[in-house]
Structure formats: C-alpha cells, structure tokens
Amino acid sequence: MHSGSLKRTSLAAAALGATVAFVLPVSADAPISGPAQQYDNFGPNEVTIRDRKSGLRWTRPRSNEPYPVRKLADAKTYCAGLQPVGENRLPSLKELLSLVDEEPHAEYVDTRNQPRYIDRNAFLRTPDKAFWTSSEFPDGSATYTVDFRTGRVDKTSSISEELGVFCVR
C-alpha cells in the first residue's frame, strides 16, 4: 500500500470512528531523508549524522536538548572539544550550505508555522538564528553565516554575536 493511501485510509477510518490497527516494522531509526537519501540511518538520540554524499559527520543535539548557541571563538572551542576531541570543527560556508533544503517545510514554533530550509527528520527544531561558518569574508572583516529559517547566506562582523553552532568532522 502506498504511504499516501495509508495516511488517507487512516484519516478516513478515524473520521468514521473506526479503530484501525497497522502492523509496521519496529525501528528506532528515522527514515533516510533529504535529496536522494542523503543521510545514513539515525535514531532520535544520535548526536552525529553522516551525509552519504560528502562523507561529513554533522553534530546535532539529542531530541530533548537545544542547539548550542555561542560567540564565534566559543563556537570554535565548543566544536574542537566534542568527542572525538580535536576532530570536530565549524563547517565552511560550502559545507553548511549542503544542509540547506531548496524546498522549505513548516515547523510549528511559538504558536505559528514557520518555514525551515533544513531536513526536519535530521535536524528537528533548528532555532531561528543564523549559524556560524568558518569561512571569512575575503578581506577578513566578517564571517559568513547561514540562516535555515530563510535559507539565506549572510555575514556578520560581530564576533560577540551569539549564533547557532553546527559542528562537522
């Protein structure tokens, strides 16, 4: 049965007051999502997720934890201190852009639906903040950032600003 017809059947049965039982395989793994099954299988409490295309391993908080928010120097220190120590770092602009979805989805945040340009299964609850990259503006006056609420690249010259942190190895 196609998953779309499964959903419609469930809704129709629920609307009629019927009890519907489905037998599904038991798995703690989230579906592989993203373009062309971008990520390896992962569970809700896995703190890293591997991008199959690039081979990069992205950090993410456990399902009940917030994303880290830090000043630029603290973000670099935070990433370097993650296990395995010394292997994690802030991503480059090109690397972080690989997480931007071209088609946004809506997430219910603060009493309303808001767009998100990042895979909802892999990176749920991405905050309304830009995220640091390790890439600096050519003249060194600013650092590039990526905002997954808008899908846009920006820059900031304020190293004391607290932005979101993704770490990669």
Image (spheres, rainbow, N blue to C red):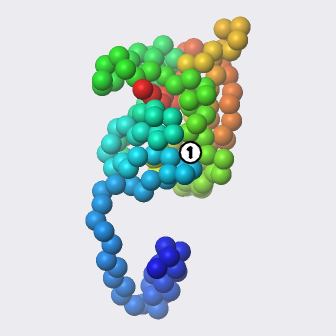
| Of 50 and 75, the residue lying toward us | 50
Q: Is residue 69 visible?
A: no
Quarter containing the C terminus:
top left
Q: Position of residue 3 (x, y in %)?
A: 49, 73
- Quadrant in the rendering for residue 128: top right
**Residue shown at 44% from the left, 53% from the top:** 32
87 lies left or right of 116: left
Q: Amino acid at mark 1?
A: Ile
100 lies left or right of 72: right
**Residue shown at 51% from the left, 30% from the top:** 164
- The crowd level at tag 1 (other Cα within 10 Å; few <14, some 14-19, many 20+) is many
| Residue highlighted by disc 1 | 118
**Residue shown at 40% from the left, 40% from the top:** 49
**Residue shown at 60% from the left, 54% from the top:** 105
* 137 shown above or below 54: above
Q: Secondary structure at mark 1?
A: strand
* 125 shown above or below 5: above
Q: Position of residue 139 (x, y in %)?
A: 71, 8
- Quadrant in the rendering for residue 18: bottom left
Q: Position of residue 85 (x, y in %)?
A: 31, 19
Q: Is residue 153 visible?
A: yes
Total of numbered circles in the picture? 1
Q: Position of residue 63 (x, y in %)?
A: 36, 46
| Of 67 and 33, the residue lying toward us | 33
Single out the residue that lies furthest toward the right.
Answer: 139
| Of 47 and 19, the residue lying toward us | 47
* 94 shown above or below 76: below
